[in-house]
Amino acid sequence: MASGTDEALTCTGSVLSAALSEKLYVIRGGCGAGRELDSYSLFFSIIAFSGVKMINQLLAGVHIASGAEAMALGARLGLNTRMLFDFVKNSGGTSWMFENRVPHMLDNDYTPYSALDIFVKDLGIVTRESSSLKVPLHIATVAHQLFLADMTLHSGKLGPALPFLIHREVYETLTGVKVEGKLPVLKKEVVLQSLPPEWPLDPIDDIHRLNQSNSKTLVVLDDDPTGTQTVHDIEVLTEWSVESLVEKLRKKPKCFFILTNSRSLSSEKEADAVVSLLGEMDAWIICPFFLQGGRYTIKDIHYVADSDWLVPAGDTEFARDASFGYKSSNLREWVEEKTRGRIPASSVSSISINLLREGGPDAVCDTLCNLQKAELRGKSFLCRTAASFVSTRIGIIPKAPILPKDLGINKERKGGLIVVGSYVPKTTKQVEELKLQCGHFLKKLEVSVDKLAMKSLEEREEEINRVAEMANLFLGASKDTLIMTSRELITGKTACESLEINFKVSSALVEIVRRISTRPRYILAKGGITSSDLATKALEAKCAKVVGQALAGIPLWQLGPESRHPGVPYIVFPGNVGDSKALADVVKSWALPSRLSSTKELLLNAERGGYAVGAFNVYNMEGAEAVVAAAEEENSPAILQIHPSALKQGGIPLVACCVSAAEQANVPITVHFDHGTSKQELVEALDLGFDSLMVDGSHLSLKDNIAYTKYISLLAHSKNMLVEAELGRLSGTEDDLTVEDYEARLTDVNQAEEFIDETGIDALAVCIGNVHGKYPASGPNLRLDLLKDLHALSSKKGVFLVLHGASGLSEELIKASIQRGVTKFNVNTEVRKAYMNSLSNPKQDLVHVMASAKEAMKAVVAEKMRLFGSSGKA
């Protein structure tokens, strides 16, 4: 708008027109005019410019107030205010001010588009003018009073800390309730660097001293098992009879947990339960800080760390939980929200992070931060906190994550059981990453939430039975097994209905785990309610010991002796902890290794222990089972060997049979490819699952043998396979392959040094008078002096010694060979003979033939293990 003398307007008209075009309104008659306007050229004329401006400001102010009032009502009704805005702006109730200002209200955008004092002034002009004209303006007058009250509330101060967004001030004046806003996502590094440095003194010694002067036991009521995320060597009670509590308190531990599972109750029942148990407290202290889970509270706003960013808790997936959701990120407002206004935000005291860091414990003692001192003064406090508070309160020093070897279960061969009930998006991402990284060894069973919660009882029962039966099979076959609820989120119309659905799903998971009879190597439960119900209802644990964490923030228990699986490690994996890879990382670290040991480890242990490992040639399933059964009975390591002729007949299924037998064995068993005489069969063997192989170039010249062995050795080592090779040549017959006596050659020590240096082999099969097959009637004639020299060489080179042809060797020769460095004996002839002899006895059925053959071979294998000294060495 422009006004001035006629002469001035004429001179500046072209400039104003070019700059502002049709948006310019010109008032003729001099400054302050506005009762009558003439139009000319490109300028639009309007009547009574000052009056028009008053009308515009009247509507703008009223629309801001009414828009804020409408959004307030929507928030009170529980509507999604963002969806509400989208709907209204496309309906007849919209206005320019509504569409322009409400988005800033929702985003907490404090950019001052309209200063509060401007609207107080303009609406004041409107009301005064209406009064002089005797025109009643009821709505405008109310709006003016609202703006005026809001300005009075803040003492009329304007500044960067309080930009006075009109819509926000009016809204807060109207209701005192926040519209669903959006606090900014902050750069974690920037925020943390902007804070004062942490208090420089470590208070751990003071905490220990205060604990010693306070004889009371700290009892932690945990709403689900995930609260043990930061402690270790602390016990948990899952039932709290008077007898169990008296017994526990009589022992005077510094702390123990009681698992209440109150999270499965409604908010009202949970609060009532706490008060009925503990009575009224002097104060409730809320401290949700949880370092391992990336939970920070800064300026009363609670943040969840997501990679490098801090996200206000009210804007995370956890806030949208159908049963436990919330809107407020500000903890004061969160208290008001959760108490439904019973405790207003204004009555909640706050201790700032600045005070904690700059003043330390003494500075906040009077405001009850130093709880022990306050408790000694007779005050009673209920601390509602995250896990970090408990470990700090009792002075626990963190320790490294627990692994299977730390609990002595790394040799157990049953599968691990992973149960996922949590449905939050973070868990879904973690499950997808788990399947991606561990899908090659993990058996997956998805449970239909729809069938469990929404279908008939018959369909529910059928689904429970299906999953339990399959899980039993997989766990018994040493397969880590994932049981997970389907990922679609099914919710009720109310929070209570959603809790009911949760209960149906959780109770079904309980029933599934209860019907699994196989003892798992470990159990991982994902989700708070899931982990609580499985521990108490499915596994019937009344107590457990928190031994530590499987990963930061992920508790690891050992179940009590009264449980269905005493001592089984129980990993309590919260639904809201860890990045997308955390679940996969834990499962991988607890995964059943494909072998308990490698061939190299077997021989290294034998060398250190002064015994030898038997390598037994097998030709079928009965042979593999016989070796494994003997090894488990004798608690001995063993090697399953497959000769090329056996591989030709049995093919890949024979290798798979041996590999599977080795994986499921309770003692270290490896699979070895024996006497590979052709490059093709050795290259093919590299990818069949063998742990080690033998390169047999003994029929070649030294030069060709070196080249041949070196080539295969390089390929095998790239796959972490042990390589055995033969230098010299054994006479005798094995698997239809015969070497005449005149072709036999003893191992030359000088050639052996060159051979080892050039090929890089790990084990040397020596020829010292040993033979394949039967020894002559005069008996074996071993060159033990040569073996001694070869041992001196192999010890210097770090190479194991192997002796083929152990069948028929006396106990004396076996022991003498072990003393001279032999760590692996090949056994074939005697085992084959036992098998063939068993076939000569009449049997009723084929299964009896198989059982008889297995027992005959098992007896020979067990005898050899005792002879080699490997019994009891697994």
Image: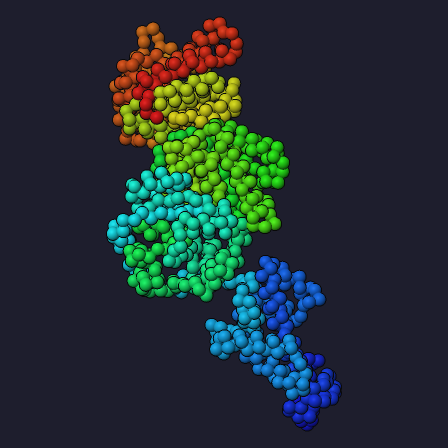
Residue 865 seen by the camera: yes
Left or right of residue 262, residue 373 in this image: left
Q: Where is residue 284 in the image (x, y as percent from the top left)?
A: 40, 57
Q: Is residue 782 shown above or below 215?
A: above
Residue at horizontal 31%, vertical 17%?
867
Color encoding of the figure: rainbow
Left or right of residue 416, residue 398 in this image: left
Q: Is residue 705 shown above or below 108?
A: above
Q: Is residue 850 shown above or below 433?
A: above
Residue at horizontal 60%, vertical 68%?
69
Quadrant occupied by the C terminus? top left
Residue at horizontal 26%, vertical 21%?
819
Q: Where is residue 740 in the image (x, y as percent from the top left)?
A: 40, 12
Q: Position of residue 208 (x, y in %)?
A: 27, 51
Q: Where is residue 187 in the image (x, y as percent from the top left)?
A: 46, 61
Residue 227 seen by the camera: no
Left or right of residue 255, residue 700 in this image: right
Quadrant occupied by the N terminus? bottom right
The image quarter containing residue 547 is top left
Q: How many labels does the image show?
A: 0
Residue at horizontal 47%, vertical 21%?
644
